[in-house]
Image: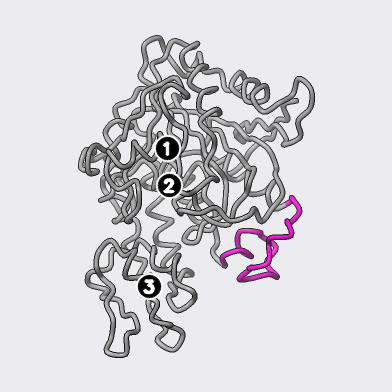
């Protein structure tokens, strides 16, 4: 059977501002059925890297916090430590980044918890019996929470085409060791002819896997490489990945991690996807590029697969913005494929195959 996906479009008017729309969507999700009195509730967000402004605002998180409290739950705002270098690689830096981006307890109305502990070692091996993993490393505070509400910014992503709810619960709920396991098939290479010896790739590599050759150009040691692809993000054009094969493997693994994040919380999760300010890249970057598609609206569902499928289809129907000028495959019908030449569908399909949800959905408009 198709899953219900509730949708409020991006237009606002008197009495129909974003907060009102969120409240109506939450009512459709029926938090009182998901959350029992005194349940601890993980509100999974991405509070953004320092310098990024594309993440979903803390004021939105506050709307969800208030609804969880009204249902009798004990909410906490949470995210995990990162695999790459940046301002979220350990809990102190991560919390200060969250506060700097507006997610202070006084604003969101709930405590901030880095779900995998001080350095990302606080996780649970959750059995999933997948094709790639028998168990996955899920951040303990997320695993042990009784329920979870997931707030996701739908946007492009260099490695998986699109980031939404499934990415937020797979990569986003994994400890760094799990993130590395998912990325392990991604092995970038350097085109020496294109390399300008700027050294940016060396600065961002968390594994010290990149060094200079005698001619100062970069080279990558695949024995040390952990597959995080940070070098690809900052390189002007000399470092590439065989995304057609490597990304598909990573996305299959993401489906297994998505399953692991939901174990123990069956029928106790809800997902809010914000298909607005639809940027080309992840909020993990320390910048935010201009959106490539016009705002669509907010989608909500109990099904992470269905809400991502619906988000992608609606974005594909939306007009391009004037900033959509760096398309790798401009003739592609799918906007995310046109953007990065990476198919987003394998990780959504993998999550469906692991029992996380259905790609069939019924869109229910909420006004």
> Left of 74 or right of it: where is 160?
right
Choose the circle earlier in sequence order: 1 or 2: 2
Density class for disc 2 (Cα within 10 Å; few <14, some 14-19, many ≥20) is many
Q: Position of residue 124 (x, y in %)?
A: 23, 37
Q: Secondary structure at mark 1?
A: helix
* 11 and 357: which is toward the camera: 11
Q: Which residue carries the number 3 mark?
A: 188
Element type at mark 3: loop
Q: Earlier in the sequence, mark 2 or mark 3?
A: 2
- The colour scheme of the drawn protein is one colour
Q: Position of residue 57 (x, y in %)?
A: 54, 34
Residue 100, numbered label:
1
Q: Are marks 3 and 1 in contact (CB under 8 Å)?
A: no
Residue 344 located left or right of residue 72? right
Mark 3 residue crowding within 10 angstroms, few (<14) / some (14–19) / many (20+): many
Q: CA distance from mark 1 to mark 2?
A: 8 Å
Residue 184 locus on image (x, y percent): 31, 62
The image shows residue 34, relative to residue 200, as above or below, that is above
Is 30 above or below relative to 12?
Answer: above
Q: Please name which of the two marks, 2 or 3, marks the residue nearer to the observer.
A: 2
Q: Is residue 280 magenta?
A: no
Q: Which residue lies under the disc numbered 2? A: 50
Q: CA distance from mark 2 to mark 3?
A: 25 Å
Q: Are marks 1 and 2 in contact (CB under 8 Å)?
A: yes
Residue at 47% x, 24% y is 107
Locate residue 169, reporting x and y percent. 42, 41
């Amino acid at each position: 059977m198709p899953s219900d996906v509730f949708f409020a479009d991006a237009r606002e008017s008197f009495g129909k501002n974003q907060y009102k729309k969120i409240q109506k969507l939450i009512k459709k999700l029926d938090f009182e059925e998901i959350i029992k009195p005194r349940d601890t509730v993980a509100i999974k967000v991405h509070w953004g890297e320092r310098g990024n402004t594309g993440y979903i605002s803390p004021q939105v998180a506050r709307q969800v916090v208030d609804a969880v409290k009204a249902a009798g739950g004990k909410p906490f705002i949470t995210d995990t430590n990162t695999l790459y270098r940046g301002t979220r690689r350990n809990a102190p830096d991560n919390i200060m980044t969250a506060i700097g981006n507006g997610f202070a307890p006084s604003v969101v109305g709930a405590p901030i918890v880095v779900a995998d502990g001080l350095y990302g070692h606080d996780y649970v091996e959750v059995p999933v019996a997948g094709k790639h993993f028998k168990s996955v490393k899920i951040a303990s505070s997320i695993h042990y929470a009784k329920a979870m509400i997931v707030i996701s910014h739908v946007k492009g992503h260099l490695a998986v085409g699109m980031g939404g709810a499934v990415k937020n619960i797979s990569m986003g709920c994994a400890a760094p060791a799990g993130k590395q396991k998912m990325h392990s098939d991604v092995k970038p290479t350097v085109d020496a002819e294109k390399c300008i010896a700027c050294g940016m790739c060396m600065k961002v590599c968390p594994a010290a896997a990149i060094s200079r050759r005698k001619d100062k150009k970069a080279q990558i040691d695949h024995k040390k490489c952990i597959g995080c692809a940070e070098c690809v993000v900052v390189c002007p054009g000399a470092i590439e990945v065989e995304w057609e094969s490597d990304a598909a493997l990573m996305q299959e693994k993401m489906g297994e991690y998505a399953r692991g994040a939901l174990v123990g919380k069956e029928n106790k999760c809800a997902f809010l996807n914000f298909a607005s300010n639809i940027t080309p890249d992840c909020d993990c970057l320390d910048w935010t590029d201009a959106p490539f598609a016009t705002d669509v609206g907010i989608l909500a569902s109990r099904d992470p697969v269905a809400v991502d499928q619906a988000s992608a289809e609606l974005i594909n129907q939306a007009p391009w913005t004037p900033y959509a000028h760096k398309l790798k495959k401009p003739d592609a019908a799918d906007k995310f494929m046109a953007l990065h030449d990476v198919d987003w569908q394998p990780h959504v399909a993998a999550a469906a195959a692991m029992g996380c949800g259905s790609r069939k959905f019924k869109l229910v408009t909420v006004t």
